Image: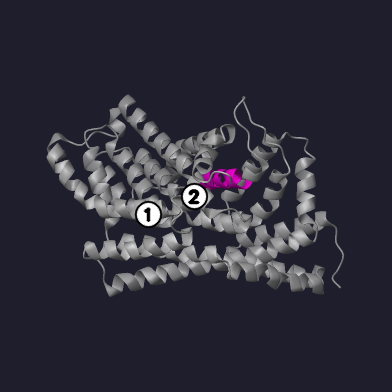
Amino acid sequence: MGLEISIEWLSLLLFGGLGLLLLLGLPMAFCTGSLAVIFLFVFGNSAILNMMPARIFPFMTDYQLSAVPLFIFMAAMLEKAGIIEELFDVIYKWLGSVKGGLASATVIACTALAAMVGVVGATEVTMGMIALPAMLKRGYDPQLACGALLSGGTLGILIPPSVMAIVYAVVAQQSLGELLVGSILPGFMLAGLYVGYVTIRCYINPSLGPALPVEERVDMREKLHLLRNTISPILLIILVLGVIFLGIATPVEAAGIGTFGALFVSALHRRLTWIAVQEAAIATLKATAMVMWIFFGATMFVGFFIVKGGQTFVANSILGTGLSPYGILLLMMAILIVLGMFLDWVGILLLTVPIFLPILKSLDFTGLLGVNGVAPSEVPLWYGVIFMVNMQVAFLSPPFGYSLFYLKSVAPPQITMAMVFKAALPFIGLQILGLALCITFPDIILWLPRLVYPGH
């Protein structure tokens, strides 16, 4: 029999210990897992100990999670095939005569890339190596150039096929197909906000993002000729998303189709080599292993906390604030933004969703400003997309936003960390605006799933 301790002290020790270990620089997976084991031994009992395998085993055997390595491998293969460089080249030549066209092309290329790969790191690093030198060479303001890259790169979280959506669907027991469909409009809305912001700023102050010199522009015939290079990746995007939305294949089967398609596209571009496949496979293995270890550690951590009464304690504490349902949701968003400054998205998702989602399901979201509300059955879907938009803010939030460091790792020496931090701020504002719109007007998220999945 373990030692007895009040839930208040247990919460303080558990999360205080987690914060301390993370500050010491230990990996998230091993922090949560080791703390869970220690606290189980000291404060648990045999019944709780037996519960741990029962929580972990369903994750290990969850069919939907097999989409994670498939989509990561697809991303890695497309990166090796040079598809991303060709996409960027085509888009910026089409937008060359527009002020800020290169920055807008960066956001659009990132959006297309997000629809192919669903992985933020791959998008950020690859586009950073291709687009940032191109913009700086043509006299773009470094902060605007970095901001366009940072914001465009985070769209990989949201636009299908998103690895985050797969993990959320498993944890929240939410239909992955509905979640992927629900994230399309918010994803394109945010991409539109980024492009609009860049374009307006460059037209107000053309020195921030000058149009391409006349001698570098191409005529319409050349533009149409360039489009040939984009046919295969665009067809791959349409194929992967189309089979999901039309109900022809499950998201996992679509991931398998996408993986085969990425190999086929690489072969078309004469980039399919054993070395490329080997590098893509190793990158997939590392990323998938990291995700799964965090899964196991965080599942044990949260499972122990819930069994000891942590969920009831957090629910009573949040509901005890006396805030309205939307006030509680905003409090949760603020907690997520703060956590996003220090933790990665897998950890945040696994630590918060099992605790926050039951609270939200018990609340009545009847609608704001006279717009349609959210039915209780739609809350997991609505919150899932809001969570993913919130994680975009987390990826850009100083001091430890992952995208900031992805970009700095490939930026030229004259781009300082302070410049990268400043570049992110206006785009964080746009993300918060997008978050507010998704909360105020739930139909931005729910309209398309209701259309594609009537009766759900």
Residue shown at 23% from the left, 48% from the top: 89
Distance in Å between CA atoms under marks 1 and 2: 13 Å
Q: Of label 1 and label 2, which has the lower sequence position?
A: 1
Please say whether residue 382 is one of the residues in the magenta stretch: yes
Residue 371 in the image, given as x and y percentages of width and height? 59, 28
* Image position of 193 (left or right of 141): right
Q: Is residue 86 visible?
A: no
Relative to 369, residue 4 above or below: below
SS at mark 2? helix
Relative to 329, residue 255 above or below: below
Which image quarter is the N terminus in?
Answer: bottom right
Q: Which mark is residue 236?
A: none
Residue shown at 27% from the left, 48% from the top: 88
The residue that label 1 is drawn on is 116
In this rendered view, identify the residue nearer to me: 140 or 182: 182
Residue 433 in the image, given as x and y percentages of width and height? 52, 33
Please say whether residue 213 is one of the residues in the magenta stretch: no
The residue that label 2 is drawn on is 180
Q: Single out the mark in the foreground, 1 or 2.
A: 2
Residue pushed farthest front? 455
The magenta span reads 379-399
Please report contact status of discs 1 and 2: CB closer than 8 Å, yes or no.
no
Relative to 362, residue 258 above or below: below
**Toward which corner of the image does residue 224 lie, by quadrant?**
top left
Q: Is residue 8 visible?
A: yes
* Image position of 415 (left or right of 424): left
Q: How many callouts does the rendering have? A: 2
User: What sort of colour scheme is used for the picture?
Assistant: one colour
Q: Amino acid at mark 1?
A: Met
* Image position of 144 (left or right of 26): left
Residue 84 in the image, given as x and y percentages of width and height? 30, 54
